[in-house]
Image (cartoon, coloured by chain):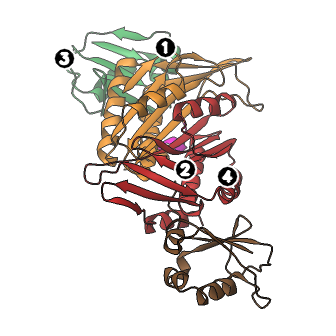
Chain colours: A green, B brown, C red, D orange
Amino acid sequence: MKVLYFAWLRERLNRASDDINLPDDITTLTELVAWLRANDEALDLAMDNPKQFKLSRNARIVSWDTAITDDDTIAILPPMTGG
Amino acid sequence: MKVLYFAWLRERLNRASDDINLPDDITTLTELVAWLRANDEALDLAMDNPKQFKLSRNARIVSWDTAITDDDTIAILPPMTGG
Amino acid sequence: MIVISSLPFDPGKLLHDFQSDHPDAGAAVTFTGMVRSTKDRPISALILECYPELAENEIAAIRTAAVDRFSLIDAAIVHRYGRLVPGEPIMQVMTLASHRQAAFDGAQFLMDYLKTDAPFWKQEETEAGTAWVEAKAADDAARERWT
Amino acid sequence: MIVISSLPFDPGKLLHDFQSDHPDAGAAVTFTGMVRSTKDRPISALILECYPELAENEIAAIRTAAVDRFSLIDAAIVHRYGRLVPGEPIMQVMTLASHRQAAFDGAQFLMDYLKTDAPFWKQEETEAGTAWVEAKAADDAARERWT
């Protein structure tokens, strides 16, 4: 699974993406984020206000309870400031 | 005094303007319109719903109770449909 | 800028020139009104009558009111008269502001006032002849929302 | 039309091309957002980061929602990313409709959704360095008015 980071989240982590092997017991985005935070202190700190982030799966914004598989590309998106 | 007519009012009257000598006892636009209608049956009929008309004095829209003089240019304006 | 003219204009060129003059603004809103002919009600032309001196004065007053009320950086109004065919631009309103809501509100305010207070009258030209366009109660209502 | 690109665009040329394709519409509204530098808060540039695939998909969905909701004849969105200097256009939204209120509402709807749902992130470049622009609660509120 590919996990992408954008904007200040990318800067705080010093990387734009991770390639991870998704454990079998992680089946939703909520579980994925919890697992990523448990394994990365910088990500855990950066996401201490998790509700502000949107998540995408395969380039579509989806809700946090969306089911995921190891083939997906996930992105963690700080609040957007375009327009 | 010059009185201008526009759009369908101009068409109904078959003329775009009148040059009139303002009687001394006519001092406001309301009085002018009443006097014009009393002297012109076509105008009287065309203005049977007078509230819908706006009036201008010297190329500014003004209220019906505005004072007028013989030097003014007045216009009687059907409801506008620009934009 | 206020232009009352029988000459055609290019909406894009107007917008280009308007924005080029103001590199400090954050938001621009442009409204363009065009002659419309539909299958249900085909017209061959729209003929606009105008009282030019009054149009200049009233539009200048409306423009100043909009600039003051919405703190616009600039506002421009272009309105044509004469005979126009379907697809041709009739008029254009442009606003420049620091932020988007003021630019949108300023443009809508200008449009609502122009519809009821600018001395233009439209005639539709069809196969059956020409007929004056009736004023819409909805336009009076739209203007009232700003008072 | 949806364009997500790092290349500059000319707001007037976009409007010209957009309208030329649609001689049957009665009303067009164009919103242009530009890089803004003020005396109080001077910046040398705005640097926009983007997730292009997601931007294409989300903007297409927002565009379809606007066209359906306001019966638009057409809608176009152009959004840049990369480094832009003050005065440069960042993005433009254009709507075409039969009547003016639908064109205005469609453009405002698109803007409100783009502000909160299009994956772009702005950094301001000043003498002190670069800093991420914070999301505004007002933008969330503006989006909520359509739900």
Residues marked 4 and 1, same chain = no
Residue B49: x percent and y percent? 50, 82
Q: Marks 3 and 2, how far apart in space?
A: 72 Å
Label 4's element? helix
Residue D25: x percent and y percent? 37, 43
Q: Marks 4 and 1, how far apart in space?
A: 51 Å
Say which quadrant the C terminus of chain C sits in. Answer: bottom right
Q: Marks 4 and 2, how far apart in space?
A: 19 Å
Residue type at tag 2 = Tyr
- Whether residue C1 is visible here, answered yes or no, is yes
Secondary structure, magenta segment, majority class = helix
Badge 2 vs badge 1, beta-carbon distance below 8 Å: no
Q: Which mark is residue A24?
A: 3
Residue mark closest to the camera, 2 vs 1: 2
Residue type at tag 4 = Arg
Q: Which residue is mark 2?
A: C81
Residue mark closest to the camera, 4 vs 2: 2
Q: Which residue is mark 1?
A: A13
Q: Marks 2 and 1, how far apart in space?
A: 61 Å
Q: Which residues are magenta?
A: D136-140
Residue mark closest to the camera, 1 vs 3: 1
Q: Which residue is mark 4?
A: C63
Total count of labels: 4
Q: Is residue B73 above or below residue A14?
A: below
**The disc numbered 4 marks a residue on which chain?**
C
Residue beneath the point at 30% across and 54% down = C127
